[in-house]
Image: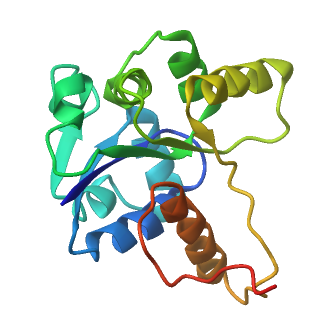
Amino acid sequence: MRDILVGVSGASGMPLALCLMRLLAAMPDVRTHCVVSDGARAVLRTECGADADLLTALAHTVYAAEDLGAGPASGSWWRGGSEPAAMLLVPCSMGAVGAIASGATRNLVHRSADVALKERLPLVLVTRESPLSAIHLRNMLALSEAGAVIMPFSPGFYLNPQTLDDMLLHMCGRILDQVGLPHALGRWPG
């Protein structure tokens, strides 16, 4: 079993988080963990007309964002499975980027990402912001240099997407690639 922690911060992009959680829930060799920030709960209501249960119902284990004593806040939790755990922060707000880059973790989403970095485990940040300020860029560079994968939600058009779901699935495939999870969601045809 591979443990994948999905952190959800308060950036726009909740349909992408939902698509990813559905894909992970369907993988028999993946145990999905989820933590949803307070900001994400508000954005979920706006973008999906739902509460956090929409996402958390798809997880094996759910942690409260304010529970800094939960398993993912400790390095030993990350090494407990047969394969190293990984964290996907989808979507990742610039507030979360700043907190993680500075080490000023205020909730379990931030702390978990901080621990993934210190343990040298996969951390993928699917950022959502435009335009980017110099502060955003510096923070993302600091995180990249620390080992995180910075992956802006930038849909590709080479698979000729016909629907929003097509674009979401393609992006999820690219996210899964970053942590070595197999999928059949389409790749560059060239």
Q: Identify the residue at image location x=85%, y=20%.
A: 134
Above or below for 140 versus 45: above
Above or below for 102 versus 28: above
Most foreground residue, 98 or 164: 98
Q: Identify the residue at image location x=24%, y=24%.
A: 75
Most foreground residue, 140 or 117: 117
Residue 131: horizontal and vertical position, in percent?
Answer: 85, 38
Image quadrant occupied by the N terminus:
bottom left
Q: Identify the residue at image location x=53%, y=55%.
A: 178
Q: Does residue 96 appear left or right of residue 150 in this picture?
A: left
Residue 182: horizontal and vertical position, in percent?
Answer: 43, 73
Image quadrant occupied by the C terminus:
bottom right
Q: Identify the residue at image location x=76%, y=19%.
A: 138
Q: Does residue 63 appear left or right of residue 54 in this picture?
A: left
Q: Quadrant of residue 29?
A: bottom left
Residue 85: horizontal and vertical position, in percent?
Answer: 29, 45
Residue 88: horizontal and vertical position, in percent?
Answer: 44, 47
Above or below for 159 versus 126: below
Most foreground residue, 160 or 66: 160
Most foreground residue, 49 or 113: 113
Identify the coloring: rainbow
